[in-house]
Image: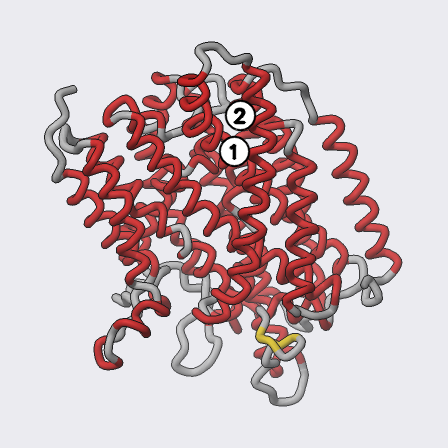
Amino acid sequence: MLGQYAFIDILVFIGYGLLLLGSGWLFNRKNRSANDYFLGGNAIPMWMVAISVLATSQSAATFLGGPDQGYRNDLTYLSTNIGAFIAAYFVAIFLIPRFYQQKVFTVYELLEQRFGSGAKRLAGLMYLFGRVFASGARLYMAALAVSMILFGNIDASSVITATLIITVCGLVYTVYGGIRTVIYSDVLQAAIYVGAAVAVIIVLYQAIPASFGDIVNALQQPAPGETSKLRLINTDIDFSNTGVFSLLSVLTGFVLLNIAAFGLDQDMTQRVLTCKDAKEGSKAMLMSVVMVIPVMLLFLVIGLLLYIYYQRPDIMAAGATDGPVPTFAGEPVTIFMYYVLTEIPAGVRGLVTVGILAAALSTLNSGLNSMASVLVQDLYRPWKQKQQSHTDEGHYVKVGRWAMALVAAALGGMACLCYYWQQYTNMPLLQFALGVMVFSYSGLLGVYFITLFSKRGSQLSVIAALIVGFLVPLSMQPYVIDTVLPTHWQFELGFTWQLVIGTFIAAVVCAMGKASKN
């Protein structure tokens, strides 16, 4: 299984394993209450929360998809941070103070105060459903890479085994320590995968026989008629998948995507709620947006250097070539994985493998804890309180651990399903990972906009809006369009525009409910 690794790679694996065991033992703390287990007692340092939010957002999809984006296109993916900043300020002003005021465990408890427990339960279920899609897709990408590196193939059995390895490691590491362990490990994992990215950049830069200035000039003038690969802002009007990183898309769909991620997705928001107050939580979130930019740039730079390495034989002093067609075991792979599998030096290969695992575990651990918190706090606790007026807090900690195991099984199953889904859509990894979030975000955004800025809405209209918000993006998926519409009516719509349309329709449906008396 490890035949393609050198002794130094094996040493890297052993070192990473010992680091995981040692940090797991060090970070593990006894949790006496649900507040300790799910919110860390509101005592997590702000800077650690910021890094945890960063690590959660920068998954294996970024590790693998970021270089692919840089290789195929340019730096316009960086411009999505404009939308992230706008969204972060919105969440800091309108949502985070409300969460701390109401002392909630999950963001969906706010809906209960306005529309009743039914709205809260459905919002929690919608989040869980959407998060299974999103986190499952990220887990699949990591499993695909691990399968190629460890087993030398991407057969279904190997991908499933890799999924099982990652899922079990994440569950064991997280299940006893709760959110404290998740946040502390996020800091560690972020350092590892950023270090791996830096190592790859150094190796690639040294392999290119050109000065820094020559490399920059080649990227500015890639080929006759092509735009610069250093372009930051794309002002084209393009509503297809190729235009999702355009400025118009950034100022609309990506603003909505980040509002949902920072303020309505328990996966991210739970970290912010571990700070001591709303002010610290807002600072942590804004700091994470700032830190994302250089980290995102690292992975894009890998792609740009791979472009020089493979597509510019004039610089590499190689024969005329159009570059490789990156395939592995007969299947297409990203250019970064092709490089890792065929040419990366010993030692760095082990570090990259560990980096992929670190990115995957960081995102997986986050999903396990946040989804378990929704299952326990929004669904199980209300039911238990109806059955028994007083229940010891330790009971909810135990239930939370069982909930994590259930969530881990669901994510593993979704990752296996994505093995077939992504191959059908033929969508780049990064867009695929971002796009699956739309299913749960559309309805939640529509409902929360009406909740925050109007007195409209009822429990029935909230439930209808959440369902419609899921169905609208679903109706725009290629497999649905190809099945339902005649050939001359078929179209392609980028996921950001699916989110805009889905959010608008969901908001209209929610506003159709009777005005609240509150």
* Outermost right residue: 7
Residue 43 visible, this orientation:
no
Quarter of the figure with residue 108: top left
Please, what secondary structure does the residue beneath circle 1 have? Answer: helix
How many numbered callouts? Answer: 2
Q: Which of 353 and 510 is in front in this view?
A: 510
* Dot 1 and dot 2 residues touching (CB under 8 Å): yes
* Horizontal side of residue 429 vs 278, given as left or right: right
Q: Would you call the spot at circle 2 few (<14 residues within 10 Å), some (14-19), or many (20 or more)?
A: many
Residue sitting at x 31%, y 50%: 470
Residue 438: give its label: none
Rendered location of residue 88, percent (x, y)? 37, 37
Q: How far apart are marks 1 and 2 (CA)?
A: 9 Å
Q: Which of 460 and 428 is in front in this view?
A: 460
Single out the mark in the foreground, 1 or 2: 1
Depicted 25 relative to depicted 416: above or below: above
Q: Would you call the spot at circle 1 few (<14 residues within 10 Å), some (14-19), or many (20 or more)?
A: many
Where is mark 2, residue-wise? 38
Q: Which of 479 and 391 is in front in this view?
A: 391
Rendered location of residue 7, percent (x, y)? 88, 58
Residue sitting at x 55%, y 66%: 304
Residue sitting at x 45%, y 60%: 432
Residue sitting at x 17%, y 33%: 457
Disc 1 marks a residue whose amino acid type is Ala
Depicted 404 relative to depicted 474: above or below: above
Disc 2 marks a residue whose amino acid type is Phe
Rendered location of residue 69, percent (x, y)? 49, 64
Where is mark 1, residue-wise? 372
Depicted 513 relative to depicted 353: above or below: above
* Horizontal side of residue 103 vs 212, given as left or right: left
